[in-house]
Image (cartoon, rainbow, N blue to C red):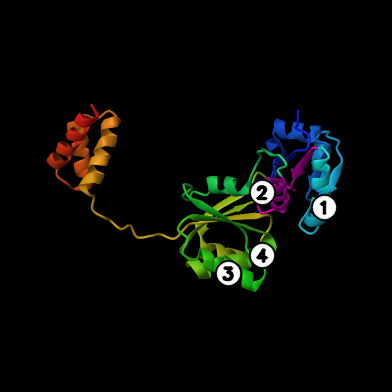
Amino acid sequence: MLEKGALYVVGTPIGNLGDFSPRARETLAEADFIAAEDTRVTRGLLARFDIHKPLLSYFEHNKLSRGETILARLRAGETCALVSDAGMPAVSDPGETLIAACAREGLPVYVVPGPTAAISALAVSGLPTGRFTFEGFLSMNKRGRREHLAQVEGEARTMIFYEAPHKLRRTLGDLEKLFGPERKIAVVRELTKIHEEVWRTTLGEAAARYREQEPRGEYVLVVAGAERPVKEEPYSLEEAVELAQELLEAGASPSEAAKQAAQASGLRKAAIYKVLTGAAGERG
């Protein structure tokens, strides 16, 4: 049962309909109404799964006025499911505005997770995934684009960009100029669809290819972060002992812990062992 007066943020397939989860289908079937980015797209999805619910359009150019309508219906106790054309609503999507409005008013918001192009592309990119930034779409406006690119110029984390085919050439050219032709990139196209492609290459090669080839489909660009020189700083005795204590807690003997900490830090084993066994004695 859905909670009355709540907004449910529902992820929908980004290509393959087999990715539509049972919980997502149940939520759409139980909601009082569905707020959709493009009602024509969502109507096709609902028909495929035999779901019949009232649809309300909610997109970038009507999000303020239509958002007020949705909020009023939520306050009245109706349940709304929010969907985008594909993927997770609110991620580079006008649903962000509606969710923020619900948060301000204390209206409950729940998420029904689903496919997300950004994370899916990152996962198959072959680039570091431990730390990353989601940059969304670059602006077509010259000033906005210039400001956005200036902000990521020294970014060391992996960066994820969305791009439409008609803007791809310009974006790859701008990224090549900013980061250099040798910077690694994964050009991920048409995820989960028939013509899915993951091309791991460099910015120079990617820009050159699409100067000659017409871009087709929706793209996610996963760009390697800047390499930072590793600055080796000497271990202090305190840091070496902390390392030895971690090894001790993991099951190493005091002698072995001190030995490994000495190898890692370059400090004398005897000095580490003396402090380590003293600290261990105090804890005992």
The residues bearing labels 4 and 3 have C-alpha atoms spaced at a distance of 17 Å
- Dot in front, 2 or 3: 3
Q: Amino acid type of disc 4?
A: Lys
Residue 206 screen position, x and y as percent: 55, 62
Magenta stretch bounds: 79-105
Q: Amino acid type of disc 3?
A: Glu
**If you read the primary sequence from the N terminus, does the residue marked by circle 4 or circle 1 appear first?**
1
**If you read the primary sequence from the N terminus, does the residue marked by circle 4 or circle 3 appear first?**
3
- Dot in front, 2 or 4: 4
* Relative horizontal placement of residue 128, taking residue 103 as reference (left or right): left
What residue sits 65% from the left and 50% below the top? 91
In what element is the residue under mark 1? helix
The residues bearing labels 3 and 1 have C-alpha atoms spaced at a distance of 31 Å
**In which quadrant of the rendered view does residue 22 lie?**
top right
Q: Amino acid type of disc 2?
A: His
- Dot in front, 4 or 1: 1
The residues bearing labels 2 and 4 have C-alpha atoms spaced at a distance of 20 Å
The circle on residue 195 is 2
What residue sits 71% from the left and 36% below the top? 20
The circle on residue 147 is 3
**Disc 4 designates what residue?**
167
The circle on residue 66 is 1
Location of residue 61 with respect to 72 vertically, above or below: below
The residues bearing labels 1 and 2 have C-alpha atoms spaced at a distance of 36 Å
